[in-house]
Image (cartoon, grey):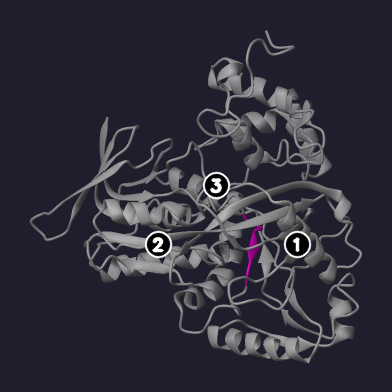
Amino acid sequence: MTETFDIAIVGAGITGCAIARQLARFELSICVVEAANDIALGASKANGGLVHAGYDPAPGTVKAQVNARGCELYGTWAQELGFLFCRTGSMVLGFNDEDRAHLEQLRSNGLANGVPELSIVGPDRIHELEPRASASATCALWCPSTGFVDPFEVAIAALENAVANGVTFMRSAPVEAIEVAGSDDGAARFTLATPAGDVHCRYLINAAGNGAADISHMAGAEEFQMVWRQGNIVVLDKEPRALMPLYPVPTPISKGVIVTGTVHGNTVITATAAVREPGDTQTYAGDVNALLTGARKLVPDLDTRRVVRAFAGGRPVIQGTNDFFIGQSAVVPGLFQAAGIQSPGVASAPAIAERMELVMRKAGVELHERADWNPIRRAPDDFDRAPLARKEELIESDPAWGQIVCRCETVPEAEIVAAIRRQPGAVSVEGVKRRCRAGMGRCQSGFCQSRVVAIIARELGCDPSEVLLEDTGSWLVEGPLKGVR
């Protein structure tokens, strides 16, 4: 099957989904082409979810230009798209005079980058803001605008809204080749060959994360190499009160080991930074120990025995630069690059999308707003967080809302069904998990996975043995599933 679009976006990570949502407001046919079978399965999944404020990037870099703006936009995006966002503020803790000098430099960077209300505070204010911060901290950079999200929730919400506004999503469609042909108006025409069918488009946006160099090469555009800067991350069980994000003084390649709360009440320790072989998502004992040690320096009373999950992923870093590459290709007109989107990619996503729109306008792409554009995406019901009256209303409407499948996160059957039926919906166990948290709790799906598999099989009309954990080949069941007829 061959389809033709005005714009094809390669990559359904948070960057590609944000761009799709931004451009869906215009009278254009758009397709998001994703190699995996779901949204946000690359760097966007293996991420701590921090919405960094923008004091870290060097002034004048592309990162600096989009980070603070992206952080500012999150309030509006969260309201329109219905995802959870907590703007708690953050502190970078210093322990000596040398650290204080670094904090002053970060403050200067932040002021140059447009970050509001930055200040250096002392021990009393540190412990007023976050009582669990180390008593050894002598100073801190206080930044009220920092926050956190679930990055895959943001990506899913953005693409759901884009699809509701007419965008097509092609999953399980890795780009195997790109043919570039000229046209009468001088712009290129692209044909993307994928196992799911060819895609023709007038404009191509490369938002392929760690695969961005391959897409650029296939299109005959800029040649660059990606470095797999791997990060290990540790998730702890829920706390009575979510921690404010606490940072150490950063290094030239990393923000260091950060301790932060999450929108669901867990504590996350994020992230190490080691150059490893591309695709390496193994967790390493040395890295995990470094995370736990670094976390205890910032929060001495952190009970690191309460770890429920450790995982790893790779940041899409362009070799030889520590900056984002956002703009039209200088080699192939009509190809637009959003490459090297490492940290602070999550924080910058709304502004990267905004910048891509501006770049395309400057390149002569006609963008006329649709009369029926709807920026609002209604968030799905979250049974665990719903008020009692809403819980009763849901159960009255469908008894499956009262059938709890995931006990750790209080996820009922109806919520799982809704996650599968949404557009685009979940087609795997992990896809369900990312949308409604079934399996995210302390038992890590030990009790609920078989129930989730059965529900997916029923909803997708397939045998349980065909249900995937995640991507192609990750089957969970062989033979009859107990309790399923």
Residue at the top extreme? 485
* Label drawn at residue 290: 1
Task: Indicate the amino acid at tag 2.
Answer: Ala
Residue at the left extreme? 184
Please tell me which of labels 2 and 1 falls first in the chain. 1
Mark 2 residue element: strand
Q: Main secondary structure of the magenta part?
A: loop
- The vertical placement of 358 against 306, above or below, is below
Of circles 2 and 1, the one toward us is: 1
Placement of the C terminus among the 4 image quadrants: top right
- Between the C-alphas of marks 3 and 2, the distance is 19 Å
Q: Name which quarter of the figure residue 2 lies in.
A: top left
Placement of the N terminus among the 4 image quadrants: top left
* Residue 29, percent from left and from top: 30, 47
Q: Residue tagged by mark 3? A: 156
Is residue 127 shown left or right of residue 106?
Answer: right
In this rendered view, identify the residue nearer to me: 99 or 411. 99
Q: Residue tagged by mark 2? A: 338
Is residue 49 shown left or right of residue 35?
Answer: right
